[in-house]
Structures are given as structure tokens and as C-alpha cells.
Image: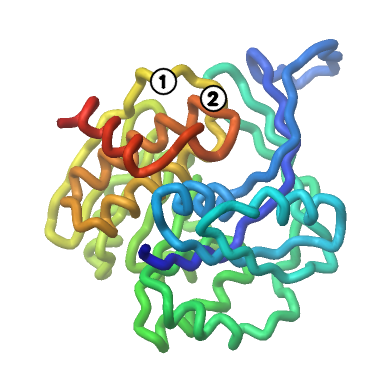
Amino acid sequence: MKKVLVVGGASFDSIIYLEEFPKPEPKTFHKSEFQETVGSTGVGKTTNLSKLDFNVTFHALIGKDVYAEKIREYLKMPNITFLYYEDGNGTQRHVNIMNKQGERISIFVNNSSDKPNLDFAQFDPLIRHSDFVVLNITNYSRFLIPICQQLNKPIWTDLHDYNLGNSYHQDFIKAANYIFLSSDNLSDYRPFMEKMIEEGKELVVCTHGKNGASGTNKAGQWLEVEAVKDFDLVDSNGAGDAFFSGFLYAHARGYDFQKCLEMGSINGALCIHSRKLYAENLNTNRLEDCYRQYFS
């Protein structure tokens, strides 16, 4: 089993499902679907990767509260080692409002600390012995960049809904060897992706939701992959992390760039058919079977 270290991104979320987003006016909704569950990008990647036969070590900030306990219990899954720091700010919490198109308004109602009092040297052996290192864009993850560089360990990162020039992302952009992002706030994504390759990145992948994904790499390839649309939309939370995980699964197996993108597309589609951050009954056989069904 390949070993992957995932750093940052655990929360406890309240998710509200509406037919459409409310207009900016006072209103009472007398009924809506609703769930409370563990969320965020680190949890999404960790759970997907664990089900795709990676041995995952996941580190995150959580509080000393009831929400932290829910996260710890949730992550008691095969192939996951969960390491955490008890943050004085408490567990990060989100309120996500979803519409029937799968679009999301995400409100951070409690944030974790930007600079926790962590001994970052403890990450040295974790990074050293991992086959892949994923630094999510939680602020404390940026402090691991020098360790990765000292150990000559390539960095995978996910910029999510990056908007051009946002200074928060720059450390991750500069350091990462493998970059993922969405086009939600970057409609003119191709120049950015090509610039990243010019600056020495191994590959850059941009997802477009129901419109598929684009990818480019240092070999000069520019590839497009369609979204798989045969799965009914249940909940789009986690789809980007599922795409990332499907791609990394294929990459770790030595599949070519096109197949990696297609595997990402498959896993993202499987994810939106579930109210979890990963598909029901996800495993490598199911992913490979779906690939043969849709792309072979």
C-alpha cells in the first residue's frame, strides 16, 4: 500500500438543502432537508484515499469539544491514522447551504488557529516516509513547506476556488509540484495553468464541476475530460476531493495522464451520488469497473 500524508482540513458541518438559494430579503423556510456531519477537504481526501488502498496518515487541528470527538469517531476507518492537535480555538465548523444544482454557499462559523503552537519537527519522519505529501491550504500547512523542500519531497496541493492574485495561496502555488484547483472563481484558467507549467510544475488540473476537467503537464499535453453524468446528484460536497483522490489513485498505479483524469472524473461522479464525502461501497474494484464502463 502506498503511504500518503494529508495535512489540514477537518470540520464539523451543518448542511442545509434548498431548492434554490434565498434572495437577499427576510424569509422563513418552514421545511428543509438537513444533516450534520464531519467535513472539510482533508477528511474528504483521507476517506477517499483510504478506500482506494492507500495507507493514509491525516493530521488536522480539532478542538477539545464534542465536535472533535465526532471527528475522531468518524475517522476510525481502515487504512487511516488520525493525528491531531487540540486547538484552543475549538473545532472548525461550517454551515453549507446547497441548492438543487449542487452549488454551495459555505459559511465558516468557527475557524481554527492560523498559527497553532505546534512542534513542526514532528512532521519530519511523517514526510520522509510518505510516498505522497498533500498539503491542503489550511494556514498551518504552509509551515511544512520548508521540511518538504529540505527532504526533496514533492508537494501536492489543492487551491480549490482560487481567484487570480489571492496572496493567501502564493506559498502553496510557489512550492507545489502538483496543483489542483477549480474554475469557480477563475473562468480564464488556461493562462494560469500554462504559466504554472512554465514555472516548473509537474502537472496542473482544473475541475469545472458538471463541465468536466482540464489538465496540462510538463510533457506539454493539454487534455480535457468530460464529467460522468449518469449518477443522480445527491450532494456535491466532497466531489473535488474525490476527483483528486481518483486521480492520485491512477497516478500511483502509473496510468497515463488521460486515464488519471478519467479516474478522477469517475470518482467525483460516484461521490455526488452520496451524502457522504465518498461514494457508498467505494473500492478499487468499483472504480476500475466504472472506468471500463465509461471510458474503455
- Quadrant in which residue 72 is drawn: bottom right
**Which part of the image, by quadrant, shows the C terminus?**
top left
Q: Which residue is mark 2?
A: 102
Disc 1 from disc 2: Cα separation: 13 Å
The dot on residue 231 is 1
Task: Give how far across and how far down residue 24 sits, in percent.
Answer: 75, 21
* Closer to us: 205 or 194: 205
Neighbour tally class for label 2: few under 14, some 14-19, many 20 plus, Cα within 10 Å:
some
- Looking at the rendered structure, the kind of residue marked 2 is Gly
Instruction: State the residue at coordinates (56%, 35%).
Output: 237
Task: Give how far across and how far down residue 84 sits, in percent.
Answer: 69, 68
Instruction: State the residue at coordinates (17%, 46%).
Output: 222
Task: Give how far across and how far down residue 80 sits, in percent.
Answer: 55, 59
Indicate the secondary structure of the residue bearing disc 1: loop
Q: Is residue 207 above or below residue 111?
A: above
Q: Is residue 24 left or right of residue 187?
A: right
Q: Is residue 100 left or right of residue 223?
A: right
**Which part of the image, by quadrant, shows the N terminus?**
bottom left
